Image (cartoon, rainbow, N blue to C red):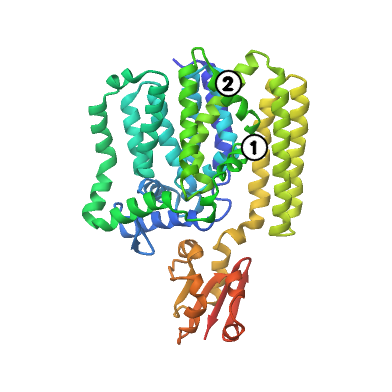
């Protein structure tokens, strides 16, 4: 029988996470290039009635396993093929992850630690962002989180089942994380004998039944083309070779974590230190959570391909550690720690405010009003947190962080993001395109814009190598249309530019023709 206090906690967590994750799903267009890829692939699954082999532009697509495509396809059938449905699975699992953090944390630590950990997770900036994005990272994070927490609760069949679902979501990296994190924990805590009770044989069979059918089917249908592209390029090559310039920066994820875990970055260092020093009944759990976070951070820091979203799987253990620490500091009345965390928060908030003003000046002058409001929200929150921290009011500080993030993210999504979506999405651009296009001539489009162009126009166009733009233009004798980045267009020679007719310019996109 669940008592009233548990129901109250669940209601609050569901309310906070639900407002953050579901309020804005259909509020703005899919952002290039990643969100349209997943939405378009799911749409083509329905179009071709093929739920085994993912496609994009009508061609087979070996980038990711099918789990997120399946989930979006189901959402499309329920809600229609819009932005809300494309993002719905991420929001669903973001809320589910918050509730799981509470239900698990209350058993691993205590009621208040679990409750605080769940709120920390739901209101962290990057968790919120990816809970509102049509990408695979939140789905992977939920399944990986469920698998690893199942190990802590000794629910081994759930461990294998959720690990298998993670593999069908993102690939073999889920096996690596589960094996290494659990293995290091058993070694560190001297618990290797636990392996005997982990139902390895039957668990492996359960894992295989769930995880392998899609991989086997893809191999029989597509042969080595699937193995070479999915495993060879998208897993091994992308780990060893940078796909973006950021891959060479070893420190890339340090600022990502500092800002992504905002506002709870203020407690992060203290929580990790307290977890590492824990000697009592929570020692094993704290060690496990520390190893979990460290392995994810270390793995993706070593990877030569880096994206902001990759380290999301370390947010659940960090949030639970912060929840454990906050409960401990609250119980032991560590007022000095509360004050120092408020100062750290003020410093991080100051950097974030500076970043907002810089972005406002670079992107568009229209953003400055929104930037000033966001800066004002953060400034008021900072002052309030400092005052309440120096007055030794733990509850007021926790409430202010949660409510502050709800207000901050709400204004960000409703007022600020719409000002920059024309530069982040092709949705409005496609409307201009349809008014100018003759409906017959071929369309050549830069790779970055192609997924969104296909999703919003229904036309794939022909992928254009931007580095060979001039040669491609000059090589066409018949009428053709081109969609490229503005900076690429401006680099064309005067001779080539004289042969072109610009039809539309919107933000960073230029639509022109050569008659």
Residue shown at 77%/36% (left/top)?
380
**Residue 490 makes an appearance in the image:** yes
Front-most of residues 220 and 111: 220
Which residue position holds label 2? Answer: 274
Left or right of 190, for residue 433: right
Q: Nearer the viewer, residue 21 or 201?
A: 201
Is residue 50 at least partly visible in the picture?
Answer: no
Q: Image quarter for residue 502?
A: bottom right
How many callouts does the rendering have? 2
Which residue corresponds to the image point at 71% horizontal and 18% vertical from the top-left? 335
- Looking at this view, name the residue that lies furthest to the left: 220
> Relative to 200, does residue 328 appear above or below in the rendering?
above
Place of residue 486 in the rendered image (x, y in percent of width and height, measured from the top left):
60, 70
Left or right of 410? Residue 45 is left
Image spot of residue 55 (x, y percent): 35, 59
Query: Which quarter of the rendering shows the N terminus?
Result: top left
User: From the viewer's perspective, is 172 left or right of 504?
Assistant: left
Residue under pointer 1? 406
């Amino acid at each position: 029988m669940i008592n009233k206090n548990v129901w109250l906690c669940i209601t609050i967590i569901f309310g906070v996470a639900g407002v953050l994750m579901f309020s804005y799903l259909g509020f703005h267009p899919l952002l290039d290039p990643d969100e349209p890829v997943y939405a378009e692939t799911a749409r083509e699954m329905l179009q071709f009635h093929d739920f085994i082999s993912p496609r994009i532009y009508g061609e087979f697509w070996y980038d990711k396993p099918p789990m997120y495509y399946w989930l979006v396809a189901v959402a499309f059938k329920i809600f229609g093929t819009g932005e809300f449905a494309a993002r719905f699975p991420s929001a669903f699992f973001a809320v589910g992850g918050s509730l799981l953090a509470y239900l698990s944390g209350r058993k691993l630590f205590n009621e208040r630690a679990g409750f605080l950990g769940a709120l920390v997770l739901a209101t962290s900036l990057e968790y919120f962002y990816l809970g509102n994005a049509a990408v695979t990272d939140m789905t992977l994070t939920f399944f990986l989180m469920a698998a690893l927490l199942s190990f802590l609760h000794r629910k081994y069949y759930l461990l294998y089942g959720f690990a298998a679902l993670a593999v069908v979501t993102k690939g073999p990296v889920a096996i690596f994380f589960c094996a290494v994190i659990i293995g290091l924990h058993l070694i560190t805590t001297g618990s290797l004998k636990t392996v005997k009770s982990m139902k390895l044989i039957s668990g492996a069979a359960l894992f295989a039944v769930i995880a392998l059918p899609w991989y086997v089917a893809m191999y029989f249908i597509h042969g080595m083309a699937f193995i070479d592209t999915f495993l060879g390029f998208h897993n091994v090559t992308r780990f060893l070779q940078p796909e973006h310039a950021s891959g060479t920066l070893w420190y890339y994820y340090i600022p990502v974590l500092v800002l992504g875990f905002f506002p709870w970055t203020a407690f992060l260092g203290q929580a990790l230190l307290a977890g590492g020093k824990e000697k009592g009944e929570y020692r094993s759990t704290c060690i496990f959570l520390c190893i979990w976070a460290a392995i994810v951070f270390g793995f993706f820091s070593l990877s030569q391909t880096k994206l902001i979203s990759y380290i999301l799987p370390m947010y659940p253990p960090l949030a639970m550690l912060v929840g454990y620490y906050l409960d401990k500091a609250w119980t032991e009345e560590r007022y000095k720690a509360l004050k120092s965390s408020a100062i750290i928060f003020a410093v991080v908030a100051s950097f974030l405010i500076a970043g907002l003003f810089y972005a406002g000046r670079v992107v568009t002058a229209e953003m400055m009003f929104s930037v000033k409001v966001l800066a004002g929200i953060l400034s008021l929150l900072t002052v309030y947190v400092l005052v309440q921290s120096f007055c030794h009011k733990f509850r007021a500080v926790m409430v202010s962080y949660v409510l502050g993030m709800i207000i901050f993210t709400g204004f960000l999504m409703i007022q600020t993001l719409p000002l920059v979506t024309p530069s982040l999405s092709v949705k409005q651009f496609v409307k201009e395109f349809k008014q100018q296009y003759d409906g017959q001539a071929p369309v050549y489009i830069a790779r970055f814009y192609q997924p969104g162009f296909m999703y919003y126009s229904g036309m794939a166009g022909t992928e254009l190598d931007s580095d060979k733009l001039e040669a491609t233009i000059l090589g066409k004798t018949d009428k053709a249309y081109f969609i490229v980045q503005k900076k690429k267009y401006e680099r064309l020679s005067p001779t080539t530019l004289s042969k072109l007719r610009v039809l539309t310019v919107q933000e960073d996109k230029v639509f022109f023709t050569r008659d």
